[in-house]
Amino acid sequence: MSQLEQLQDAIRHKLPELDMVIAWGTGFDPLHATPLFIREQGDLDKMTWGPLCVHNLATYLPGLKGKKVGVVVKGCDSRSIVQLLEESLIERENLTVFGLPCEGIVDLAKVEEALGPEAGFVREVREEGDALVVQTDSGDHRLSIAELRPQKCLSCRYPNPIIADQVLGEPREPVKDPTDPDLEALEAMSYDERMQYWTAQLDRCIRCYACRNACPMCVCRDHCIAQTRDPQWISQETGVAEKWLFQIIHAQHLAGRCTECGECERACPMDIPILTLKRKMNREIKEMFDFEAGTDPEATPPLFTFQVEEAKINERGW
């Protein structure tokens, strides 16, 4: 029985007890999976699972508080479940988690770049060993899955669900000695070089807030500081300064909370490497508080507590 068939069978038995189960289904073409809200048995046939299932479905959970919901998560996505539980943003007794050990997803931007604009409409996508075969109007394109992985998969230490009621499939080995070349390159820059780098990157920002909307930990979007007018913190001016201010506030609000799912960067229509900002903030939190978001269901995020004396903050020495 395939991993998808195991998942369908598990959901089939649990669905009568739930209001819905959030999984993945085929989107507007075979290349794009989409979130699927399963409410009846017939919806199970619409399910799909594989490297094209890129969305972190935990994003929907805070908006469904009070309902009995099942959710399918990859190993990395389960960190968001843990973090939402730590912050009491979802209720464990109303949640059923179906966990899938994951070998990694593919970066759809890399797929589209490899296909090129002349490829035409995507007719079929299938996995053949270590390759993704994409059938388009111009013929079959055989792409190496390893070369299509996003950076978050190349450095993933949590391929298996941290929290789950049922785990379907065999456990995967985490990446050994993970590195983050984007973050290392950023930290090697001088302060002036970093400012120049981010000024150039954020100049492309169109303030669409897709990064915020896709983030599972951005739960105050109805009262977001980026859009509130009473008080008004950020204007609607289109200069880099306002774009920079929004992204810095976004990163600060996720300090000690970001689970590095990469949804912000995936959703960005301008290909801005936003996740690097969050990874940098996470590195600082790890060094200062020895805390990693979404990895311990019993932990309390460091910025949710107060201690008069912090082990690594020498306030009186300043």
Image (cartoon, rainbow, N blue to C red):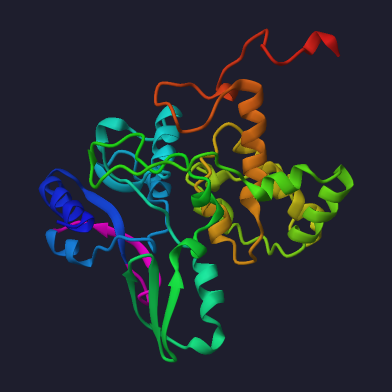
Seen in the image, is 130 located left or right of residue 178? left
Residue 142: image x %, image y %?
Answer: 42, 77
Look at the image and say whether residue 35 sits in the magenta stretch.
yes
Look at the image and say whether residue 116 sits in the magenta stretch.
no
Judge whether residue 225 can be spotted in this image: no
Q: 86 or 233: nearer the eye?
A: 86
What residue lies at 50% left-to-right and 64% top-to-bottom? Answer: 148
Quarter of the image for the N terminus: give it: bottom left
From what the image shows, is residue 124 above or below residue 151? below
Judge whether residue 189 can be spotted in this image: yes
From what the image shows, is residue 209 above or below residue 290? below
State the residue lying farthest toward the right.
192
So how many labels did they put on this image?
Answer: 0
Q: 298 or 169: nearer the eye?
A: 169
Residue 186: image x %, image y %?
Answer: 75, 47
Q: 213 or 262: nearer the eye?
A: 262
Residue 249 in which image quadrant: top right
Residue 80: image x %, image y %?
Answer: 44, 40
What residue lies at 40% left-to-right and 33% top-to-bottom? Answer: 82
Quarter of the image for the C terminus: give it: top right
Residue 282: image x %, image y %?
Answer: 61, 35
Q: 287 or 275: nearer the eye?
A: 287
Segment tinted magenta in the rendering: 26-40
What residue lies at 42% left-to-right and 54% top-to-bottom? Answer: 104
What residue lies at 48% left-to-right and 44% top-to-bottom? Answer: 156
